[in-house]
Image: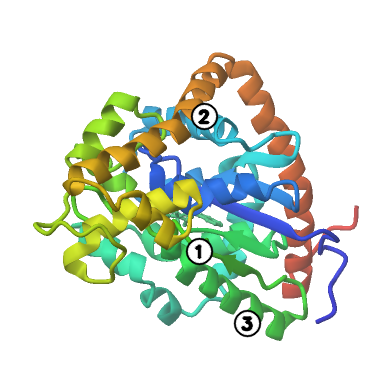
Amino acid sequence: MSPTSTFPAKRRVLSGIQPTAGIHLGNYLGAIRRWVERQHEKENLFCVVDLHALTMPQDPAALRANTQELIALYIACGLDPEVCTLFVQSHVRAHVEAGWLLTCETPLGWLNKMTQFKDKSQKQESVGTGLLVYPVLMAADILIYSADEVPVGEDQKQHVELTRNIAEKFNRRFGEVLKVPQPVIPEVGARIMGLDNPLAKMSKSSASSPGHAILLTDTPDTIMKSFKRAVTDSGGEIRFSDDPAKAGVDNLLSIYKAITGKAKEECERDFAGARGYGDLKVGVAEVVIAALAPIRERFAQIMGDRGALDAVMQRGAEKASAIADRTVGAMKDAMGLYRLPL
Ligand code: AMP
Ligand code: TRP
Protein backbone atom coordinates (compact mmCIF):
# COMPACT_ATOMS: atom_id res chain seq x y z
CA MET A 1 0.00 0.00 0.00
CA SER A 2 1.33 3.46 -0.81
CA PRO A 3 0.21 5.85 1.93
CA THR A 4 -0.99 9.23 0.75
CA SER A 5 -0.08 12.47 2.47
CA THR A 6 -3.32 12.34 4.50
CA PHE A 7 -2.02 9.41 6.59
CA PRO A 8 -0.43 10.31 9.96
CA ALA A 9 3.14 9.38 10.97
CA LYS A 10 2.21 8.18 14.50
CA ARG A 11 -0.35 5.39 14.95
CA ARG A 12 -3.71 7.04 15.27
CA VAL A 13 -6.55 5.81 17.48
CA LEU A 14 -10.20 6.73 17.10
CA SER A 15 -13.23 5.62 19.06
CA GLY A 16 -16.58 6.93 20.24
CA ILE A 17 -19.56 6.35 22.49
CA GLN A 18 -23.17 7.41 22.01
CA PRO A 19 -24.42 10.11 24.40
CA THR A 20 -27.38 8.17 25.69
CA ALA A 21 -28.00 8.07 29.43
CA GLY A 22 -26.44 5.33 31.49
CA ILE A 23 -22.71 5.07 30.71
CA HIS A 24 -21.86 1.86 32.50
CA LEU A 25 -19.13 -0.46 33.70
CA GLY A 26 -19.17 -2.31 30.34
CA ASN A 27 -18.43 0.93 28.48
CA TYR A 28 -15.60 1.60 30.93
CA LEU A 29 -13.99 -1.86 30.93
CA GLY A 30 -14.70 -2.61 27.27
CA ALA A 31 -13.62 0.74 25.90
CA ILE A 32 -12.73 3.87 27.92
CA ARG A 33 -10.24 2.28 30.32
CA ARG A 34 -8.11 1.03 27.43
CA TRP A 35 -8.19 4.43 25.79
CA VAL A 36 -6.91 5.99 29.01
CA GLU A 37 -4.15 3.41 29.54
CA ARG A 38 -2.67 3.85 26.08
CA GLN A 39 -3.27 7.55 25.47
CA HIS A 40 0.42 8.46 25.72
CA GLU A 41 1.53 5.87 23.18
CA LYS A 42 -0.59 7.08 20.27
CA GLU A 43 -2.26 10.02 18.61
CA ASN A 44 -5.83 9.85 19.94
CA LEU A 45 -9.22 11.10 18.89
CA PHE A 46 -12.25 10.27 21.02
CA CYS A 47 -15.66 11.52 20.08
CA VAL A 48 -19.14 11.65 21.49
CA VAL A 49 -21.17 10.25 18.62
CA ASP A 50 -24.35 12.29 18.98
CA LEU A 51 -25.41 11.75 15.35
CA HIS A 52 -25.48 8.02 16.03
CA ALA A 53 -27.77 8.57 19.01
CA LEU A 54 -30.37 10.01 16.61
CA THR A 55 -30.94 6.53 15.15
CA MET A 56 -33.17 5.86 18.16
CA PRO A 57 -35.79 8.25 19.58
CA GLN A 58 -34.14 10.83 21.88
CA ASP A 59 -35.47 13.61 24.05
CA PRO A 60 -33.70 16.74 22.67
CA ALA A 61 -32.95 18.28 26.09
CA ALA A 62 -31.63 14.98 27.42
CA LEU A 63 -29.46 14.44 24.34
CA ARG A 64 -27.91 17.88 24.79
CA ALA A 65 -27.20 17.27 28.48
CA ASN A 66 -25.88 13.75 27.92
CA THR A 67 -23.45 15.03 25.27
CA GLN A 68 -21.80 17.49 27.64
CA GLU A 69 -21.81 14.93 30.44
CA LEU A 70 -20.10 12.32 28.31
CA ILE A 71 -17.23 14.68 27.48
CA ALA A 72 -16.95 15.38 31.24
CA LEU A 73 -16.98 11.64 31.92
CA TYR A 74 -14.20 11.02 29.39
CA ILE A 75 -12.05 13.51 31.29
CA ALA A 76 -13.14 12.13 34.68
CA CYS A 77 -12.10 8.63 33.56
CA GLY A 78 -8.62 9.95 32.90
CA LEU A 79 -8.49 11.10 29.27
CA ASP A 80 -6.32 14.22 29.24
CA PRO A 81 -7.64 16.86 26.82
CA GLU A 82 -4.04 18.09 26.41
CA VAL A 83 -3.07 14.64 25.08
CA CYS A 84 -6.25 13.51 23.30
CA THR A 85 -8.55 15.29 20.91
CA LEU A 86 -11.97 15.12 22.58
CA PHE A 87 -14.86 16.27 20.44
CA VAL A 88 -18.53 15.97 19.54
CA GLN A 89 -19.30 14.28 16.22
CA SER A 90 -21.93 16.80 15.04
CA HIS A 91 -19.39 19.63 15.48
CA VAL A 92 -17.34 18.20 12.62
CA ARG A 93 -19.29 18.40 9.36
CA ALA A 94 -17.01 15.98 7.56
CA HIS A 95 -18.68 12.99 9.28
CA VAL A 96 -21.98 13.54 7.51
CA GLU A 97 -20.34 14.44 4.21
CA ALA A 98 -18.13 11.35 4.17
CA GLY A 99 -21.08 9.30 5.42
CA TRP A 100 -22.96 10.10 2.23
CA LEU A 101 -19.99 9.45 -0.04
CA LEU A 102 -19.49 6.04 1.57
CA THR A 103 -23.22 5.23 1.60
CA CYS A 104 -23.11 5.41 -2.19
CA GLU A 105 -20.31 2.83 -2.19
CA THR A 106 -21.85 0.38 0.30
CA PRO A 107 -23.94 -2.55 -0.96
CA LEU A 108 -27.27 -2.82 0.83
CA GLY A 109 -26.63 -6.52 1.41
CA TRP A 110 -23.69 -5.68 3.68
CA LEU A 111 -25.91 -3.56 5.94
CA ASN A 112 -28.68 -6.15 6.08
CA LYS A 113 -26.19 -8.57 7.64
CA MET A 114 -25.34 -6.41 10.66
CA THR A 115 -26.46 -8.23 13.80
CA GLN A 116 -26.98 -5.04 15.81
CA PHE A 117 -29.42 -3.78 13.16
CA LYS A 118 -31.32 -7.06 13.27
CA ASP A 119 -31.52 -6.92 17.10
CA LYS A 120 -32.52 -3.28 17.35
CA SER A 121 -34.99 -3.27 14.44
CA GLN A 122 -36.82 -6.31 15.79
CA LYS A 123 -37.56 -4.40 19.00
CA GLN A 124 -39.16 -1.46 17.15
CA GLU A 125 -42.48 -0.99 15.41
CA SER A 126 -41.13 1.46 12.87
CA VAL A 127 -37.50 1.30 11.83
CA GLY A 128 -35.73 4.50 10.77
CA THR A 129 -33.43 4.41 7.74
CA GLY A 130 -30.69 5.83 9.98
CA LEU A 131 -30.62 2.61 11.98
CA LEU A 132 -29.78 0.65 8.83
CA VAL A 133 -27.25 3.13 7.48
CA TYR A 134 -25.63 3.81 10.85
CA PRO A 135 -22.63 1.49 10.31
CA VAL A 136 -21.69 3.53 7.24
CA LEU A 137 -21.64 6.68 9.38
CA MET A 138 -19.44 4.77 11.82
CA ALA A 139 -17.15 3.84 8.93
CA ALA A 140 -16.98 7.54 8.01
CA ASP A 141 -16.13 8.42 11.66
CA ILE A 142 -13.12 6.14 11.47
CA LEU A 143 -11.95 6.60 7.89
CA ILE A 144 -11.91 10.41 7.78
CA TYR A 145 -9.18 10.36 10.44
CA SER A 146 -7.17 7.62 8.71
CA ALA A 147 -7.28 5.78 12.05
CA ASP A 148 -5.02 2.75 12.44
CA GLU A 149 -6.76 1.36 15.51
CA VAL A 150 -10.32 1.36 16.78
CA PRO A 151 -10.51 0.23 20.43
CA VAL A 152 -14.04 -1.03 21.11
CA GLY A 153 -15.89 -3.76 22.96
CA GLU A 154 -16.70 -7.09 21.30
CA ASP A 155 -20.15 -5.95 20.10
CA GLN A 156 -18.61 -3.39 17.72
CA LYS A 157 -16.17 -5.75 16.03
CA GLN A 158 -18.56 -6.46 13.15
CA HIS A 159 -18.93 -2.74 12.44
CA VAL A 160 -15.17 -2.26 12.29
CA GLU A 161 -14.89 -5.24 9.94
CA LEU A 162 -17.52 -3.59 7.73
CA THR A 163 -15.49 -0.37 7.84
CA ARG A 164 -12.48 -2.32 6.56
CA ASN A 165 -14.55 -3.78 3.73
CA ILE A 166 -15.92 -0.37 2.76
CA ALA A 167 -12.41 1.17 2.76
CA GLU A 168 -10.98 -1.66 0.67
CA LYS A 169 -13.81 -1.41 -1.85
CA PHE A 170 -13.40 2.36 -2.08
CA ASN A 171 -9.64 2.05 -2.57
CA ARG A 172 -10.01 -0.62 -5.24
CA ARG A 173 -12.29 1.64 -7.19
CA PHE A 174 -10.74 5.09 -6.58
CA GLY A 175 -7.10 4.50 -5.50
CA GLU A 176 -5.43 4.35 -2.08
CA VAL A 177 -7.29 7.16 -0.37
CA LEU A 178 -8.51 5.46 2.81
CA LYS A 179 -6.50 3.79 5.56
CA VAL A 180 -7.85 0.33 6.43
CA PRO A 181 -8.22 0.24 10.27
CA GLN A 182 -7.84 -2.56 12.82
CA PRO A 183 -10.35 -3.29 15.59
CA VAL A 184 -8.67 -3.53 19.01
CA ILE A 185 -10.69 -5.59 21.47
CA PRO A 186 -9.52 -5.89 25.09
CA GLU A 187 -8.60 -9.36 26.36
CA VAL A 188 -10.65 -8.87 29.50
CA GLY A 189 -13.78 -6.79 29.92
CA ALA A 190 -14.77 -6.87 26.24
CA ARG A 191 -18.23 -8.17 27.08
CA ILE A 192 -19.64 -7.39 30.51
CA MET A 193 -23.04 -8.97 31.08
CA GLY A 194 -26.11 -7.55 32.85
CA LEU A 195 -26.17 -8.22 36.59
CA ASP A 196 -29.88 -9.05 36.43
CA ASN A 197 -29.44 -11.35 33.41
CA PRO A 198 -25.93 -12.66 32.80
CA LEU A 199 -26.94 -13.98 29.37
CA ALA A 200 -27.55 -10.47 27.98
CA LYS A 201 -24.81 -7.85 27.70
CA MET A 202 -24.87 -4.87 30.02
CA SER A 203 -26.41 -2.11 27.92
CA LYS A 204 -27.45 1.51 28.17
CA SER A 205 -30.90 0.73 26.83
CA SER A 206 -31.61 -1.46 29.88
CA ALA A 207 -29.65 0.76 32.28
CA SER A 208 -32.79 2.22 33.84
CA SER A 209 -34.04 -1.15 35.05
CA PRO A 210 -32.78 -1.51 38.62
CA GLY A 211 -30.00 -4.02 39.21
CA HIS A 212 -29.06 -4.33 35.51
CA ALA A 213 -26.05 -2.05 35.13
CA ILE A 214 -23.44 -0.31 37.25
CA LEU A 215 -23.29 3.31 36.11
CA LEU A 216 -20.00 5.18 36.34
CA THR A 217 -21.76 7.81 38.43
CA ASP A 218 -23.51 5.38 40.83
CA THR A 219 -22.91 5.95 44.55
CA PRO A 220 -21.00 3.27 46.53
CA ASP A 221 -24.27 2.36 48.21
CA THR A 222 -26.08 1.77 44.91
CA ILE A 223 -23.14 -0.23 43.54
CA MET A 224 -23.11 -2.49 46.60
CA LYS A 225 -26.90 -3.00 46.38
CA SER A 226 -26.75 -3.83 42.66
CA PHE A 227 -24.04 -6.43 43.18
CA LYS A 228 -25.84 -7.97 46.17
CA ARG A 229 -28.88 -8.65 44.03
CA ALA A 230 -26.87 -9.97 41.05
CA VAL A 231 -28.32 -13.14 39.54
CA THR A 232 -26.10 -16.21 40.07
CA ASP A 233 -27.06 -19.90 40.30
CA SER A 234 -28.13 -22.36 42.94
CA GLY A 235 -24.69 -23.98 43.24
CA GLY A 236 -21.80 -22.69 45.30
CA GLU A 237 -18.69 -23.03 43.17
CA ILE A 238 -16.72 -19.84 42.53
CA ARG A 239 -14.84 -20.41 39.28
CA PHE A 240 -14.69 -19.11 35.72
CA SER A 241 -16.91 -21.16 33.44
CA ASP A 242 -18.34 -21.27 29.90
CA ASP A 243 -21.44 -23.06 31.16
CA PRO A 244 -24.45 -20.74 30.59
CA ALA A 245 -25.87 -21.95 33.91
CA LYS A 246 -22.86 -20.37 35.65
CA ALA A 247 -22.82 -17.19 33.57
CA GLY A 248 -23.64 -15.00 36.59
CA VAL A 249 -20.64 -16.15 38.63
CA ASP A 250 -18.43 -16.03 35.55
CA ASN A 251 -19.49 -12.42 34.92
CA LEU A 252 -18.76 -11.39 38.52
CA LEU A 253 -15.32 -13.01 38.37
CA SER A 254 -14.66 -11.42 34.97
CA ILE A 255 -15.47 -7.98 36.37
CA TYR A 256 -13.15 -8.69 39.32
CA LYS A 257 -10.41 -9.83 36.94
CA ALA A 258 -10.81 -6.83 34.65
CA ILE A 259 -10.62 -4.37 37.55
CA THR A 260 -7.79 -5.99 39.53
CA GLY A 261 -5.72 -7.18 36.56
CA LYS A 262 -5.12 -10.50 38.36
CA ALA A 263 -4.79 -13.87 36.59
CA LYS A 264 -7.83 -16.19 36.56
CA GLU A 265 -6.37 -18.62 39.12
CA GLU A 266 -5.53 -15.75 41.44
CA CYS A 267 -9.09 -14.40 41.24
CA GLU A 268 -10.51 -17.82 42.05
CA ARG A 269 -8.01 -18.19 44.90
CA ASP A 270 -9.11 -14.83 46.38
CA PHE A 271 -12.57 -16.35 46.91
CA ALA A 272 -11.49 -19.87 47.81
CA GLY A 273 -12.56 -19.53 51.44
CA ALA A 274 -15.78 -17.67 50.63
CA ARG A 275 -18.99 -18.65 52.35
CA GLY A 276 -21.30 -18.77 49.35
CA TYR A 277 -21.82 -16.19 46.63
CA GLY A 278 -22.52 -13.42 49.17
CA ASP A 279 -18.80 -12.98 49.82
CA LEU A 280 -18.07 -12.96 46.08
CA LYS A 281 -20.66 -10.26 45.44
CA VAL A 282 -19.33 -8.05 48.25
CA GLY A 283 -15.72 -8.64 47.17
CA VAL A 284 -16.44 -7.63 43.57
CA ALA A 285 -18.54 -4.64 44.67
CA GLU A 286 -15.65 -3.39 46.82
CA VAL A 287 -13.11 -3.33 44.00
CA VAL A 288 -15.62 -1.69 41.66
CA ILE A 289 -16.47 0.97 44.27
CA ALA A 290 -12.77 1.71 44.77
CA ALA A 291 -12.25 2.04 41.01
CA LEU A 292 -15.29 4.22 40.34
CA ALA A 293 -15.23 6.54 43.39
CA PRO A 294 -12.48 8.82 42.01
CA ILE A 295 -14.24 8.98 38.64
CA ARG A 296 -17.48 10.06 40.27
CA GLU A 297 -15.72 12.75 42.30
CA ARG A 298 -13.81 14.15 39.33
CA PHE A 299 -16.97 14.10 37.23
CA ALA A 300 -18.79 16.31 39.78
CA GLN A 301 -15.85 18.75 39.80
CA ILE A 302 -15.62 18.94 36.01
CA MET A 303 -19.36 19.52 35.63
CA GLY A 304 -18.89 22.56 37.90
CA ASP A 305 -17.04 24.42 35.12
CA ARG A 306 -19.16 24.22 31.98
CA GLY A 307 -17.16 26.98 30.27
CA ALA A 308 -14.00 24.89 30.45
CA LEU A 309 -15.88 21.92 29.02
CA ASP A 310 -17.13 23.99 26.07
CA ALA A 311 -13.54 25.10 25.46
CA VAL A 312 -12.37 21.48 25.31
CA MET A 313 -15.12 20.65 22.80
CA GLN A 314 -14.34 23.73 20.70
CA ARG A 315 -10.63 22.96 20.54
CA GLY A 316 -11.35 19.31 19.82
CA ALA A 317 -13.71 20.14 16.95
CA GLU A 318 -11.15 22.45 15.36
CA LYS A 319 -8.35 19.89 15.55
CA ALA A 320 -10.58 17.07 14.32
CA SER A 321 -12.01 19.14 11.43
CA ALA A 322 -8.53 20.01 10.20
CA ILE A 323 -7.71 16.31 9.79
CA ALA A 324 -11.11 15.17 8.54
CA ASP A 325 -11.54 17.90 5.93
CA ARG A 326 -8.32 16.81 4.22
CA THR A 327 -9.54 13.23 3.85
CA VAL A 328 -12.98 14.25 2.65
CA GLY A 329 -11.31 16.52 0.08
CA ALA A 330 -9.23 13.58 -1.15
CA MET A 331 -12.35 11.37 -1.29
CA LYS A 332 -14.29 13.95 -3.31
CA ASP A 333 -11.42 14.46 -5.72
CA ALA A 334 -11.03 10.71 -6.20
CA MET A 335 -14.77 10.28 -6.81
CA GLY A 336 -14.85 13.03 -9.41
CA LEU A 337 -16.73 15.79 -7.60
CA TYR A 338 -15.91 19.15 -9.18
CA ARG A 339 -13.63 21.32 -7.05
CA LEU A 340 -13.67 25.12 -7.45
CA PRO A 341 -10.29 26.71 -7.99
CA LEU A 342 -9.41 28.64 -4.79
P1 AMP B 1 -22.36 1.97 23.32
O1 AMP B 1 -22.84 1.79 24.74
O2 AMP B 1 -23.06 1.05 22.39
O3 AMP B 1 -22.30 3.40 22.87
O4 AMP B 1 -20.85 1.45 23.31
C1 AMP B 1 -19.72 2.24 23.60
C2 AMP B 1 -18.48 1.37 23.74
O5 AMP B 1 -18.60 0.49 24.89
C3 AMP B 1 -18.24 0.43 22.55
O6 AMP B 1 -16.83 0.33 22.34
C4 AMP B 1 -18.81 -0.88 23.01
O7 AMP B 1 -18.22 -1.97 22.37
C5 AMP B 1 -18.48 -0.87 24.49
N1 AMP B 1 -19.47 -1.67 25.25
C6 AMP B 1 -20.81 -1.46 25.30
N2 AMP B 1 -21.42 -2.36 26.09
C7 AMP B 1 -20.43 -3.17 26.57
C8 AMP B 1 -20.40 -4.31 27.44
N3 AMP B 1 -21.52 -4.78 28.00
N4 AMP B 1 -19.21 -4.89 27.70
C9 AMP B 1 -18.07 -4.40 27.16
N5 AMP B 1 -18.02 -3.34 26.32
C10 AMP B 1 -19.17 -2.71 26.02
N1 TRP C 1 -21.30 2.26 17.08
C1 TRP C 1 -20.60 2.46 18.32
C2 TRP C 1 -21.47 1.97 19.49
O1 TRP C 1 -22.66 1.95 19.41
C3 TRP C 1 -20.25 3.89 18.55
C4 TRP C 1 -19.41 4.44 17.48
C5 TRP C 1 -19.81 5.29 16.49
C6 TRP C 1 -18.02 4.21 17.27
N2 TRP C 1 -18.77 5.63 15.71
C7 TRP C 1 -17.65 5.00 16.15
C8 TRP C 1 -17.08 3.44 17.92
C9 TRP C 1 -16.36 4.99 15.64
C10 TRP C 1 -15.77 3.43 17.41
C11 TRP C 1 -15.41 4.21 16.29
O2 TRP C 1 -20.91 1.66 20.50
Sequence-first disc among 3 and 1: 3
- Residue 134 in the image, given as x and y percentages of width and height: 45, 60
* Quarter of the view holding residue 77: top right
Task: Residue under label 1, please give it.
Answer: 187
Q: Residue type at mark 3: give it.
A: Lys
Residue at 90 percent of width and 57 percent of height? 341
Q: Are marks 3 and 1 in contact (CB under 8 Å)?
A: no
Q: Nearer the viewer, residue 110 or 301?
A: 301
Side of 170 where 107 appears, left or right: left
Disc number at residue 68?
A: 2
Q: Residue type at mark 1: give it.
A: Glu
Task: Residue under label 3, please give it.
Answer: 169
Q: Secondary structure at mark 1?
A: loop
Q: CA distance from mark 2 to mark 3?
A: 36 Å
Indicate whether 342 appears above or below 208: below
Q: Secondary structure at mark 2?
A: helix
Of badges 2 and 3, nearer the viewer stands 2
Indicate whether 331 appears above or below 51: below
Q: Are marks 2 and 3 in contact (CB under 8 Å)?
A: no
Residue at 80 percent of width and 82 percent of height? 1
Sequence-first disc among 2 and 1: 2
Q: Nearer the viewer, residue 83 or 262?
A: 262
Indicate whether 91 appears above or below 306: below
Q: CA distance from mark 2 to mark 1?
A: 30 Å
Q: How many marks?
A: 3
- Residue 56 in the image, given as x and y percentages of width and height: 33, 49
Q: Nearer the viewer, residue 158 or 124?
A: 158
Q: Residue farthest to the left?
A: 234
Q: Nearer the viewer, residue 105 or 43?
A: 43
Q: Residue farthest to the front?
A: 273
Disc number at residue 55?
A: none
